[in-house]
Image (cartoon, helix red, strand yellow):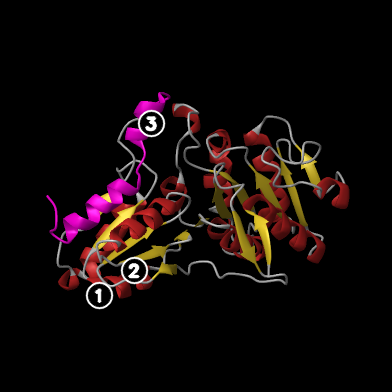
Amino acid sequence: MKTVQFREAICEAMSEEMRRDESVYLMGEEVAEYNGAYKASKGMLDEFGPKRVIDTPIAELGFAGIAIGSAMNGNRPIVEYMTFNFSLVGIDQIINNAAKIRQMSGGQLNCPIVFRGPTASAGQLGATHSQAFENWFANTPGLKVIVPSNPYDAKGLLKAAIRDDDPVIFMESEQMYGDKMEIPEGEYLIPIGVADIKREGTDVTVVSFGKIIKEAYKAADELAKEDISIEIIDLRTVRPMDHAAIIKSVKKTNRLVILEEAWPFASISSEITYRIQSEAFDFLDAPIKRITTADTPAPYSSALFEKWIPNSEDVVKAVKEVLYLKK
């Protein structure tokens, strides 16, 4: 085992796949000469050269289209967005071409491409740089959406995403790039669409994904002091979603809290809530609780931002509410 940062796990995954398969290449703003905006491609230009690690203009629509055309012609591009907030400039290419081409061509064409970069908030970056788009992309048939929460999962899932024959949205976090974790020395892959139980528990199921799951870990530590045991499920992939893992856990704990860093309307937690009430209603001993950001654009003020984003106290409160321990 070795200890790596999240950014290093991403770099290792891309580099290993580029060594394995010459059709894989990386393109995006500042990925080459600058080693990536968050240094997730450090050293890759030196190893693979400017034809496979390509700096692009500030033109997300243009380079997304180029990469999609390249994927349709036998390559496996990785497109890095400096933030998924900027992907909105190129979202027409992602939704109307990458996601639909297999169905529209009757299976004659596919689009093996990965769009990756940070999602959601990263502190005081203001309303236009703090948005989570997992539910936007997950609402599109033809796309797979992955949101890892740690370096181990990030490397294994990114390698699986690069090898996948469908377009994959791979969402990271600026605030996780420095996170450290032990990962295996050798190659490993993690299957897309399989959730992971990060902590086993008996009293309440807490489902989350991405960096906000850290707040669930903090809450679990606090609740353990009161002999309250929560089971934490990391979705890892939000489309396809591992509903079976959630249902199995709810059948054990009989209570569900969902934590995500996104607006509440039409969110991932909305989808999970529907599926559980549809398929496991008789096992629920309390209404499902969900914890999201406030239903407003992200504030710049640090004091307001702390009120806007979910935290461990919110998780503790929700868990106690479904246990009828606190109103």
Above/below status of 323 relative to 43: below
Magenta stretch holds residue 320: yes
**Percent coordinates x, y for residue 46 in the rendering:** 87, 47
- Mark 3: secondary structure: helix
Snapshot quadrant of residue 322? bottom left
**Res. 164 visible in picture:** no
Above/below status of 11 relative to 303: below
* Mark 3 residue crowding within 10 angstroms, few (<14) / some (14–19) / many (20+): some
Cα gap from disc 1 to disc 2, whole angstroms: 9 Å
Earlier sequence position, callout 1 versus callout 3:
1
Q: Which residue is mark 1?
A: 251
**Percent coordinates x, y for residue 292 in the rendering:** 32, 45
Q: Pick the residue in front: 113 or 252.
A: 252
Above/below status of 300 relative to 35: above
Magenta stretch holds residue 214: no
Q: Which residue is mark 3?
A: 305
Residue at image position (63%, 64%) is 182
Cα gap from disc 2 to disc 3, whole angstroms: 30 Å
Earlier sequence position, callout 2 versus callout 3:
2
Q: Which residue is mark 2?
A: 246
What's the amino acid at mark 1? Lys
**Percent coordinates x, y for residue 286 in the rendering:** 15, 62
Q: Which residues are magenta?
A: 299-327
Q: Mark 1 and mark 3 in contact? Answer it, CB < 8 Å.
A: no
